[in-house]
Image (tube, rainbow, N blue to C red):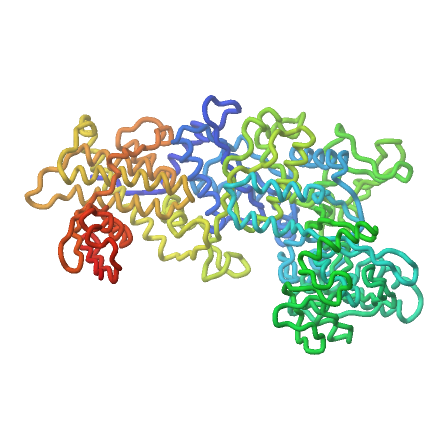
Amino acid sequence: MNRPYVPREIERKWQGYWEETGLFKASDAPAGPRFYCLMMFPYPSAALHVGHGRNYIIGDVVARYKMMRGFHVLTPMGWDAFGLPAENAAIKGGLSPRRSTLDNIAVMKRQLREWGVCYDWDREVTSCEPEYYRWTQWLFLRFLERGLACRKSAFVNWCPSCATVLANEQVVDGGCERCGAAVRQKELEQWFFRITAYAQRLLDDLALLPNWPERVKTMQRNWIGRSEGCEIDFRLASTGETLTCFTTRLDTIHGATYMVVAPEHPLVRRLAAGEGPRAAELRRFAERAVGQGRIARVAADTEKEGLFTGEEAVNPFTRARIPIWVANYVLMEYGTGAVMAVPAHDQRDFDFAKRYGLPVVPVIRGEDRPPDAAGMTGAYEGDGVLVNSGQFDGLPNREAIEAMADLMERDGFGRRAVCYRLRDWLISRQRYWGAPIPVVYCDRCGIVPVPDEDLPVLLPTDVEFLPTGESPLARCPSFVACRCPRCGGEGRRETDTMDTFVDSSWYYLRYLSPRDDRRPFDAELVNRWLPVDQYIGGVEHAILHLLYSRFVTKALQDAGFVSFPEPFKNLFTQGMIVKNGAKMSKSKGNTVSPDALIARYGADTVRLYTLFIGPPEKDAEWKDESVIGAYRFLRGLWELALPLAASLRARPDAGSADTRSPAGEALRRAVHRTIRKVTRDIEGNFHFNTALAALMELENALRGYLRPRPGEPEREPAAAACALKTIILLLAPFVPHLAEELWRELGGEGSVFRQPWPEWDPALVEEETVTVPVQVNGKLRGRVPIAAGADDEAHLAAALAEPNVKAHTQGKRLVKTVVVPGRLVNLVVN
């Protein structure tokens, strides 16, 4: 009697075998082709659910497939263990962040193993361990040496609930993505990495990444936000000081009827610091505007509010005095924090001018658009001819930009300039669970870097870490008090910790030498294996994690530590698995744990369903009741394969006999077409769902082949053996445990992943053809061979190319075509 399919017994057996034999252990210097397959390492803030699994299962399929293609595969894993997610989880669970983090790592590691997702665990890294963050601190010091780390005052996103700074992407609809609290602006002295020094290279080098998703590159371009324009110096009428603004529309400067500065602008601060009612009013307005938050201030539906500062500027082109206002819709982040307002040709300025009764002066006349301010109901933002623009009247506005820029530069009140939306990377966090910033403050020496030999600056364990608004380390005297490394006098350690994005910006380098205690990474190994051949992770990291990793790589290249400009050669961003139409999350109560599913149906079932649910780059809806379908397919394959494998083992020559019958030849062709389909689907766009559909069709074809109709000849064992072996080999990356077991049942030796990937015979994948008659005006004029399954256009093209048909249609108008696929083409001409 055949053995029943008991997934968990099979899976435990083969998971142990892979670990014992070191299937996924990579040599540092293997002979032959290498492939670095990397999945974004997870935050260990809770157990994994099936939505998380998609990333790791996809990566496991790719790694196993590449093994079978003859590559030496490096596929490591680690833990992004510092940062707010882990700390908040610890606070919620009432544990220390370290204990909570390590407990979560143990749970997630078990889950990954039970999924059958394999890694070279000898290379495991954990970012909260001193042997890792020592080198994160080393990275900070190298940036400090090269002028890429600096301390400055800046307004930041502040979450009052989490009591910490948030990066821009951690603010969603004006609230903290973690707790939902309204985010406000707060001015703090902070540490930054000068990523802006690399803005143009980060933009230009996207051209080096043809195998990244175009939408990810577009998101990065937009985030960097390069604008070409001019910086114009306006003179303050009262003091003669310069107020510089950036504009991409110099052609409209004669229509600038007022200026607007951001509430954070130094001019506003100076004026608000004075005495009297106007200064007090400016202070109140600036505080209220800044408190709205960046996102709310620039939202289209946010009411534009402003206040006259009492100062005027001189328009350098018209010499006219124009008032300077402070308004909530201008940000310091872009340009200089000051803009020239042209209400006739910018809708925001128009709305503001109408509200506060400011002049509107049209300077561009479009077609059928007379330059009449009185009749304007909105700004005209199109192109046209300049009017009310002095010597530039009559010029097309785009042409006038260059002429005006020439004049501006000649007379010295402005210059052509490039502006970026990208801001410097704020790395300071006022929280406990992060890598300490390795500097000391000395009253005599100033800011002093901690020497390399004194690293790591250890994160103390005896700290009350509940958020209060200042770094918990500031309340730990044993940590703060230290000796200045330079003069030996009393010093104070920096108490902010580093943003966890710093940890994840270089981890892919540490995997090459994770136990090296002399350097952060072995440059020889890194330059041999990198850039990463395939990087896989969620599109939610498309901007900052990837941007920061690219920046760090370029900085390390400039410093001579690596030889490549980009860290990730190929990028795949998988879609989310959702439940009830929403992203899986505990707060929504829609998470699905893999544990119970694996216990009931097996890991291969969960893997198969996860991969079959839809194109992996798109979001997909998880349906618990549909998992059973994947299980039934695997159980059916098991029940088909075991007796067939036994009969084939009983006939050692079965797999070598020629296949001659029509049925056997048809199955053989189906096998080779499936090899081609599955290979192309994996190599192309990771379309695992269609690859699996093709394998299911082949399994059905084999099942039908083994049940001949009455009177048909006995089936050839060679065809059946070829089909079964191919199904097992092609399924192996997707359902590895079942494939290993069936490979042994078939008499195979060693791991199925040490077998070569099947190759297709081009002669056997040619599409079958049918002969289709072609009529012209109802009369048979020819017959043409057509590939089975060809579309109507292919039928028509073949028909019109047939010589006799061509003779009866040439020079005539084709009135109508009727195509019955595979049966008839009828052409009506006159």
Residue occupying image coordinates x 83% and y 65%: 324
Left or right, 73 with respect to 567, comes to: left
Q: Residue 576's x, y, as percent? A: 48, 53
Disc tally is 0
Left or right, 807 with respect to 680, comes to: left
Is residue 287 at all visible to an observer of this figure? no
Q: Is residue 71 depicted above or below 234 in this figure?
A: above
Residue at the extreme bottom:
375
Q: Residue 649's x, y, as percent? A: 21, 29
Left or right, 626 with respect to 367, comes to: left
Q: Quadrant of residue 680?
A: top left
Is residue 135 at all visible to an observer of this figure? yes
| Pick the front one: 236 or 132 | 236
Q: Quadrant of residue 727?
A: top left
Q: Is residue 399 depicted above or below 307 in this figure?
A: above
Q: Quadrant of the C terminus?
A: bottom left
| Pick the front one: 689 or 818 | 818
| Pick the front one: 216 or 526 | 216
Q: Residue 542's x, y, as percent? A: 57, 48
Q: Quadrant of the N terminus?
A: top left
Left or right, 102 with respect to 581, comes to: right
Residue at the extreme left:
711
Q: Residue 697's x, y, as percent? A: 26, 46
| Pick the front one: 113 or 380 | 380
